[in-house]
Image (cartoon, rainbow, N blue to C red):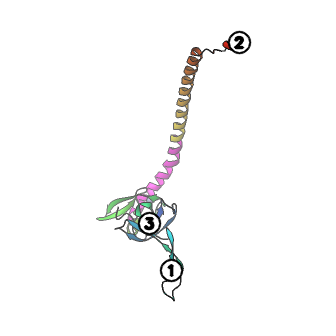
Amino acid sequence: MSNTVKKGDTVLVITGKDKGKTGKVLDVFPKDNKVLVDGVNIVTKHKKARKQNEKSEIVKKTAPINISNVMVVCGTCGKATRVAHKEINGKKVRVCKKCSASLDKEFVKATKKEAKKNIASAKAEEPAKAKKETSAKKTTAKAEKAVETKTTKEASTSTTKKSTKKPSAKTEA
Ligand SMILES: [Zn+2]
């Protein structure tokens, strides 16, 4: 976990009040598992004057957030991704799980070809796959459900009709 996010990365905030925001990592605090992200988690501090010639003021400040609240945004495919590791030229390099391009700038070139292929194939597969799967699932599920409910309803109504005879004749006398 310690070296998944680095200074200079662009990250997407996935939880908390700044969910959905992206920003550049200004600093990483591995000990606290925290990162400082530009424009994210801005807190206002009320600074009170303690000496006579000091002014009371409100200071806006970016505060660090938990590292697990952010995801690295891949510069190649533009998606927020989990980080994989790979060895390139004997060096441990961070890699995008979605397109397998490197997340470390100096290695992006080395992985760009593979990434392009992955992005292209993902785009070609995605719409066709999604359509097929969802439509097939929906129709079969619906049909099954309909059959089930029909049969159980019929069974239950026929039994109740037989067993309950209404004692309505009593009040006539
Ligand atoms: Zn990527």
Which residue is disc 1 drawn over? Answer: 48
Please tell me which residue lies in front, 171 or 40: 171
Q: In what element is the residue under mark 2?
A: helix
Q: In what element is the residue under mark 3?
A: strand
Q: The residue under label 2 is which amino acid type?
A: Glu
Query: Visible in this render: residue 29?
Result: yes
Residue at image position (47%, 52%) is 122
1 or 3: tag closer to the N-terminus: 1
**Contact, mark 3 vs mark 2 (Cβ under 8 Å):** no
Which residue is disc 2 drawn over? Answer: 172
Please tell me which residue lies in front, 10 or 114: 10
Residues rendered magenta in the picture: 109-132
Query: Visible in this render: residue 89?
Result: no
**Contact, mark 1 vs mark 3 (Cβ under 8 Å):** no
Please indicate whether residue 23 sits to the left or right of residue 85 in the image. Answer: right
Q: The residue under label 3 is which amino acid type?
A: Ile
Residue at image position (50%, 83%) is 49
Select label 1 or label 3 by which is in front.
Answer: 1
Q: In what element is the residue under mark 1?
A: loop
Q: Residue 65, labelled with which disc?
A: 3
The 10 Å Cα crowd at callout 2, few under 14, some 14 to 19, many 20 or more, is few
